Amino acid sequence: MARQAKEWLVIVNPNAGIGKVSKDWGKISLLLERYGFDYQAVFTERPRHAIKLVTDNVADGFRKILAVGGDGTMNEVVNGVFKQTQVAAHDITVGMISVGTGNDWVRTFGIPMEYEKAIRVLRKEYTMLQDAGIVSYYNSNQQDRRYFVNMAGLGFDGLVAQKTNADKKRGKGNPFLYFKHLLGSLFSYRSCNTSLNVDGKEVKNLYFSIGVGIGQYNGGGMQQAPDAIPNDGFFDLTLIKDLSKWSIIANVRRLYDGTIKQYHKVETMLGKKISVHCKTPILLEADGESLGHSPFTFEIIPQSVKVVVNENKWGQANKIQPRAV
């Protein structure tokens, strides 16, 4: 087996942030060099390319990987970490410089959006083991599965992500793209009679949207799972029941200020194994990536991904204690 010549593999998605990475890579690379990163950069060329880049380069000896891109880039890197067969997933260190349109994974872990501040945090290399999830879903009649490390959205969230990602592929986008499709989709989406099994407990209702959270944020700063603890071995479920379009508009602020669970049309649960069936197939997104449709099964993989986090937020003295269940 060939050994890597550098310490870090930096996986760069030039299209992330609607091309922002391509414009800013020169600045980012200079900062990495200034702060003493010994790295080799590789660039993604197509969707899911980062998965292959990880598996190939782990086979060549790399054990530290830095994603430069959006939440989707991080998702692909993590899927590569799980798919490689050289070492256990938790033996690989993963960090992120977030240059996407959502930037939600880094919010939970206290990684700054500003490049130099983020690199200072990464240079300290303070790590923790976070949970990962694996979701099984369908594309037509073909079953597939995907790992994720932040949040999965079902139903309305899946539709909004599908429209948002379609615009991004066409090169259209701005910081308000997700919010634009969130409002626009209100007039076409219909809630679905949905059955869930959460660790053996059956739940049925007419649901508008379901969030399955490891991290706290999605949709570019929405706190759909405000109490989520990313290393406690549980998914945080946020179940939004059917409600009028005007009620949705009036309560969007709750998604941003973390009070969503206080609304009477919202249920929250914790779970490790979840199955979801809907009378009419509903769409899925995970870490912002549009995937497939129901039925779904989710399973938590506790403390399975070693990630670089902000010590000021996740250091031993400040570490959030797991909740009693």
Image: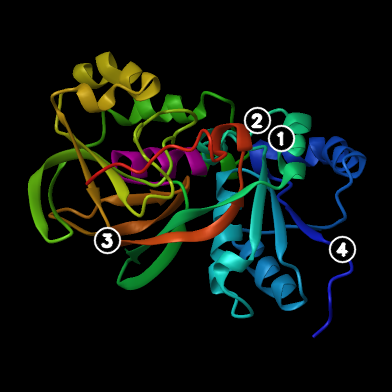
Is 96 left or right of 196, judged from the image as shown?
A: right
Residue at image coords 75%, 32%? 115
Residue span colored magenta: 151-165
CA–CA distance between discs 3 and 4? 40 Å
- Residue 281, horizontal then vertical, whole percent: 22, 55
| Residue 112 marker | 2
- Residue 43, horizontal then vertical, whole percent: 77, 56
| Residue 118 marker | 1
Q: Residues within 10 Å of mark 3 (few under 14, many from 20)?
A: many
Is 178 left or right of 249, judged from the image as shown?
A: right
Q: Nearer the viewer, mark 3 or mark 4?
A: 4
CA–CA distance between discs 3 and 1? 35 Å
Q: How is the image coloured?
A: rainbow
SS class of the residue under badge 4?
Answer: loop
Pick the residue in front: 190 or 208: 208
Earlier sequence position, callout 2 versus callout 3: 2
Cβ atoms under marks 1 and 4 closer than 8 Å = no
Mark 3 = which residue?
A: 296
Residue at image coords 26%, 51%? 282
- Amino acid type shown at disc 4: Lys
Mark 4 = which residue?
A: 6
